[in-house]
Image (spheres, rainbow, N blue to C red):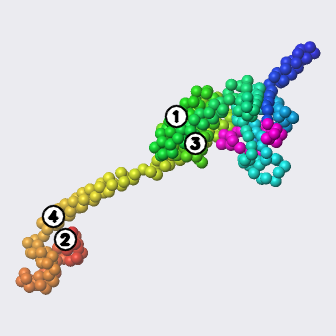
């Protein structure tokens, strides 16, 4: 029993020892302070820079500039990490040191997980953080993307015309998106996305236009959800994508030409009003005709004189009848025409 427990302890110890990361490299001590920082980046909008909340380890270089980070506290799946050096000392009163700004710093961004061994050696011309040797093939993807971005910058700077900018926008969006997809690492695609969709650069307007019709962005969300369902990157990307899609939908609605709706409605309103007027006129004419047919010959004569605005006395004189007879006929006309006064009769026949 004790033997079995001892063997189990050895296996667990061996596994624990194996499941450790190891990041080593060299820094030029003649140019840089001997503090080296390791950061985990969970917000892909803060990939480049110096942020206190991201730092998870600190070490010092030796006399030859060698540094080493080791342990087993990293995530077991790929995450974005940064190693940087700077000459903005943490004991300085300079408040810009750890708020994302340090003008005198150098960094390397890479992908890693808890079991990776990565080396950042000097290059042949003693440049630091330019070469990466890693047990994780995904560690170098950002370097590859940056090389494409350098080509893109050159293409944009060659001719600074608006026509050249539009052509290059379309070309390089597709180039970078296709390249990112071929890397088979959604986190690398987020690195590209963070650049193309950055609200502070000139590409953001084209990004919003591209988002309207390009299925790439929704497909990237599917790839992230499949490979990193619980990572902060996936949650952040989903939230940003939803927000940007809402923005373009709002802009599309607000830019709609309402004249296409207003003018047809105005025409329909005019046609409707004209039809209503004709119907009312036709009905009114019919009503008047039917009412006049109820009048006697003498009442029709009196009606005509009423419409000529004759007084009762003038009507009596014109028809050689008494005033009381005229008043009786006028009252009968009011009843048969369903009116109350001379003004109502005039309105009825003049409308």
Q: Secondary structure at mark 4?
A: helix
Q: Which mark is residue 350?
A: 2
Give the foreground label among 3 and 2.
3
Q: Secondary structure at mark 3?
A: loop
Where, quadrant-wise, is the N terminus in this rendering?
A: top right
Horizontal side, residue 117 vs residue 163: left or right: right
Q: What residue does disc 1 label?
A: 174
Residue 166 at x, y percent in the picture: 48, 42
Examine the image and state in which quarter residue 327 appears: bottom left
Give the foreground label among 3 and 1.
1
Q: What residue does disc 4 label?
A: 290
Q: Which mark is residue 197?
A: 3
- Of the residues under marks 3 and 1, which one precedes in the sequence? 1
Q: Which residues make up the magenta segment?
A: 28-52
Horizontal side, residue 130 vs residue 211: left or right: right
For the residue pair 117 and 153, the one nearer the viewer reads as: 153
């Amino acid at each position: 029993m004790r033997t079995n427990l001892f063997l189990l302890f050895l296996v667990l110890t061996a596994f624990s020892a194996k499941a450790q990361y190891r990041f080593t490299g060299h820094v030029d001590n003649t140019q840089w302070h001997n503090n080296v920082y390791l950061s985990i980046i969970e917000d892909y909008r803060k990939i480049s820079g110096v942020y206190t909340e991201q730092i998870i380890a600190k070490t010092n270089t030796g006399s030859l500039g060698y540094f080493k980070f080791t342990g087993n506290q990293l995530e077991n799946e790929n995450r974005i990490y940064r190693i940087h050096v700077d000459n903005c000392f943490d004991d300085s009163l300079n408040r810009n040191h750890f708020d994302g700004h340090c003008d005198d710093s150098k960094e390397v961004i890479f992908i890693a997980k808890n079991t990776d061994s990565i080396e950042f050696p000097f290059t042949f011309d003693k440049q630091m953080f330019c070469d990466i040797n890693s047990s994780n093939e995904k560690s170098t993807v950002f370097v590859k993307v940056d090389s494409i971005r350098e080509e893109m910058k050159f293409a944009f700077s060659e001719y600074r015309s608006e026509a050249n900018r539009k052509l290059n926008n379309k070309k390089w969006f597709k180039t970078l998106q296709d390249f990112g997809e071929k890397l088979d690492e959604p986190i690398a695609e987020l690195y590209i996305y963070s650049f193309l969709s950055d609200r502070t650069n000139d590409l953001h307007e084209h990004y919003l236009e591209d988002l309207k019709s390009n299925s790439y962005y929704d497909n990237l969300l599917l790839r992230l959800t499949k490979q990193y369902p619980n990572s902060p990157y996936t949650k952040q990307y989903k939230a940003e994508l939803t927000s940007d899609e809402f923005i373009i939908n709002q802009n599309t609605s607000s830019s709609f030409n309402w004249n296409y709706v207003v003018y047809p409605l105005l025409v329909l309103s005019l046609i409707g009003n004209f039809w209503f007027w004709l119907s009312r006129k036709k009905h009114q004419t019919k009503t008047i005709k039917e009412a006049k047919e109820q009048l006697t010959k003498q009442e029709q004569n009196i009606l005509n004189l009423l419409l000529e605005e004759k007084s009762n006395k003038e009507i009596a004189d014109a028809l050689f009848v008494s005033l009381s007879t005229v008043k009786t006929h006028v009252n009968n006309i009011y009843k048969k025409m369903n009116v109350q006064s001379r003004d109502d009769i005039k309105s009825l026949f003049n409308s």
